[in-house]
Structure formats: structure tokens, C-alpha cells
């Protein structure tokens, strides 16, 4: 083996077919956002159905219905603390943290917006939504394509999302933001059709998309739902609850890894003198602690094997 071969740097592998396809889809979405037709925002975008004031809170139900976002985010961040680092790859862990932290920021931004619905509040609302979108897309790409695809997807959304929001703020063109939001969900839907990679967070992406799609339907039917429920609850309030429910499959995936890490497992350690005799010891590992218990049949075998043969003859 030549010295030049030993000193040559390792080459990074090129793009796989799925990575190239994902990159091509991202380029198409970027082209649509940049060169597509202008999409003006609705003049009634702040005209929500439920304007009731409760306990001194304006638009109270639309405001309070953001609490599930915060609860899911805090819950997820807490559960992630119990997942061993080696259980999932770095991109999946980063995506999960970004997703759950983003839910907390979404709750804050949406609450501020619904207290006084206007364009300034909507700006912060949408900026907060960028974070969970980036985390979810990163989870999907890392879980179905590759770890570097997950990192790239998160970075792309974290760059494109704020740019799209600021573009809407300055030009009133909503198309780039629609591409980030709905186009990103389209990418997740496509990735859900691929098999999951080992060592990633086992998120049921189809369930996430189903919950999010249902939430968008209720958002579009805000006034219709309010009238159909005798003005008890509006479609937009239910949209908040359903969109927060889209975090449930991610929470369950994290809980599955936590449960695997904390469930006791049994294994046998073989010991003995020079390998001539072996004694089985059952060790239970639970939540990072070890307890040794000798199993009766194996211990009895070991005791018989190490007994003094002369004692046996005397007893006979």
C-alpha cells in the first residue's frame, strides 16, 4: 500500500437518487415562489368569526386555543431529555428539538396576533410558524432520505421561511409564504411514501399530514363552523386545536424511544474460574441503574460444579 494512498483525504459520497430528487423538488418550489403569479392576501384575513370577549380577553377562544401548541411543545422538549443520544441520529434529534421549540414560539406569536388581529401581529405569527415547519421537514428528510438531507431541509426552511414572510410584508405577495407552508407539507407527504431509515425518529408522517390538512379545512370554514355550532366555537379555534394535534405522532415517536430506554432488559453474564465453570447472573437494567440477582437454577448448578468432590464421597 503506497504512502500517497494512506495520506489521500476520504471523498464524500455524491448525491443519492432520493437526495437528488428531493433537491430537484426544492428547486421547483423555489422557482414557483420566485417566478409564480402574485397571490394577494384576502382583504378579510383578519375578520375572524369569533370576536367574543371572555374574562377580559379579546377574541378569547382564538387566543386560548393556542394553549395546546405550548403544551405539546413543552411536553415534547421534556420527553426528549429522556431519549439516549445514540437512539437517533443528530439530524433527527435537532429536528425534533426545533419542532417542539417552534410549537412554543407558535403559541406565543399566534396569541399576540389574536389579541389584536392586524398585519404586524400576523408577521410575528408567521415567523413563529417557520420553526415547526423546519423541524418537521428536517425530521421527514432525515427519516426517509439521509441525515444530511435532514440538515439541508432544516437550513433551507429556516432561510426561506423568514424571507417569504418579509417578502409578503413588503410587497403584499403571499405566494412565497404559501409555497413554504403548503409546498413544505407536499414534500412531507411525498417523503411519507418512502420507507423509514433505521436510527431515526419513528414519526407517522401520514398522521401528521392528515391532522394538518384537517386543520386547514376548518380554517377555511371559520364562519361556516361558527354558524353550524350555534356560535359555540369557530373553525379557526378548532384549527388551532387540530394543528396542535399534528404534534401527537411526533410525541408518540419520542415516547416510544423513551419507553425503550427505560424498560428493564435481562441479559446473562457468564463468570467462572479459567472458564472451567460458569455461573449465570441475571442483571436488570432500569433507568440507568443495575441490580444483580442470581437465578436459582443457574446458581445451584454453579454451586454443584464448585463443590469439593471429597465431600461428596464422604457423604456417600
Image: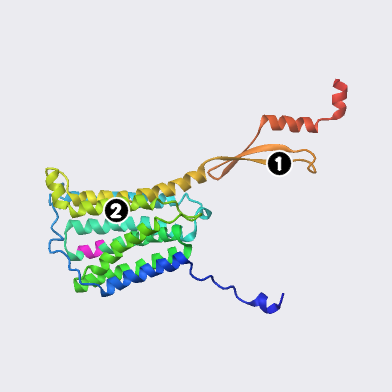
Query: In what quadrant of the picture does the C terminus appear?
Result: top right
- The residue that appears at 40% across and 46% down in the rendered structure is 252
Mark in front: 1 vs 2: 2
Give the magenta-colored segment's residue range. Answer: 121-125
- The residue that appears at 55% across and 45% down in the rendered structure is 288
Q: Is residue 124 magenta?
A: yes
- Mark yes or no: residue 66 visible: no
User: Residue 230, image x and y in percent?
Assistant: 11, 43
Find numbered disc 2 in the image and state the secondary structure of the residue it sits on.
Answer: helix
Q: Give the crowd class for mark 2: few <14, some 14-19, many >=20 residues within 10 Å.
A: many
Circle nearer the N terminus (1, 2): 2
Outermost residue on the bottom side: it is: 4
- What label sits on residue 270 in the rendered view? 1
- Overall secondary structure of the magenta section: helix
- The residue that appears at 24% across and 57% down in the rendered structure is 110
Q: Which residue is mark 2?
A: 212
- Left or right: residue 282 versus residue 166 is right
- Asked which colour scheme the image uses, the reply is rainbow
User: Residue 2, image x and y in percent?
Assistant: 71, 77
- Image mark count: 2
Amino acid at each position: 500500500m503506497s504512502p500517497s494512498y494512506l495520506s489521500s483525504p476520504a471523498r464524500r459520497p455524491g448525491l443519492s437518487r432520493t437526495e437528488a430528487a428531493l433537491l430537484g423538488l426544492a428547486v421547483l418550489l423555489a422557482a414557483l415562489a420566485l417566478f409564480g403569479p402574485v397571490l394577494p392576501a384576502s382583504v378579510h384575513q383578519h375578520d375572524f368569526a369569533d370576536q367574543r370577549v371572555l374574562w377580559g380577553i379579546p377574541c378569547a377562544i382564538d387566543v386560548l386555543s393556542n394553549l395546546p401548541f405550548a403544551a405539546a411543545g413543552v411536553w415534547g422538549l421534556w420527553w426528549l431529555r429522556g431519549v439516549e443520544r445514540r437512539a437517533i441520529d443528530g439530524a433527527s434529534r435537532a429536528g425534533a428539538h426545533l419542532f417542539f421549540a417552534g410549537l412554543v414560539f407558535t403559541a406565543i406569536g399566534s396569541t399576540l396576533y389574536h389579541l389584536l388581529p392586524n398585519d404586524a401581529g400576523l408577521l410575528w405569527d408567521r415567523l413563529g410558524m417557520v420553526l415547526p415547519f423546519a423541524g418537521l421537514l428536517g425530521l421527514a428528510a432525515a427519516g426517509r432520505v439521509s441525515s444530511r438531507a435532514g440538515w439541508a431541509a432544516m437550513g433551507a426552511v429556516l432561510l426561506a421561511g423568514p424571507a417569504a414572510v418579509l417578502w409578503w410584508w413588503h410587497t403584499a405577495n403571499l405566494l412565497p409564504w404559501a409555497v413554504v407552508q403548503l409546498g413544505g407539507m407536499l414534500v412531507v407527504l411525498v417523503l411519507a411514501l418512502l420507507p423509514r431509515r433505521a436510527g431515526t425518529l419513528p414519526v407517522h408522517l401520514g398522521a401528521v399530514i392528515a391532522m394538518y390538512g384537517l386543520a386547514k379545512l376548518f380554517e377555511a370554514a371559520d364562519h361556516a363552523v361558527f354558524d353550524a355550532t350555534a356560535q359555540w366555537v369557530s373553525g379557526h379555534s378548532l384549527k388551532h386545536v387540530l394543528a396542535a394535534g399534528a404534534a401527537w405522532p411526533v410525541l408518540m415517536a419520542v415516547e416510544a424511544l423513551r419507553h425503550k430506554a427505560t424498560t428493564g432488559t435481562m441479559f446473562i453474564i457468564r463468570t467462572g474460574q479459567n472458564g472451567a465453570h460458569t455461573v449465570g447472573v441475571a442483571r436488570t437494567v432500569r433507568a440507568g441503574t443495575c441490580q444483580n440477582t442470581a437465578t436459582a437454577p443457574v446458581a445451584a448448578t454453579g454451586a454443584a460444579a464448585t463443590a469439593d468432590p471429597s465431600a461428596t464421597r464422604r457423604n456417600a
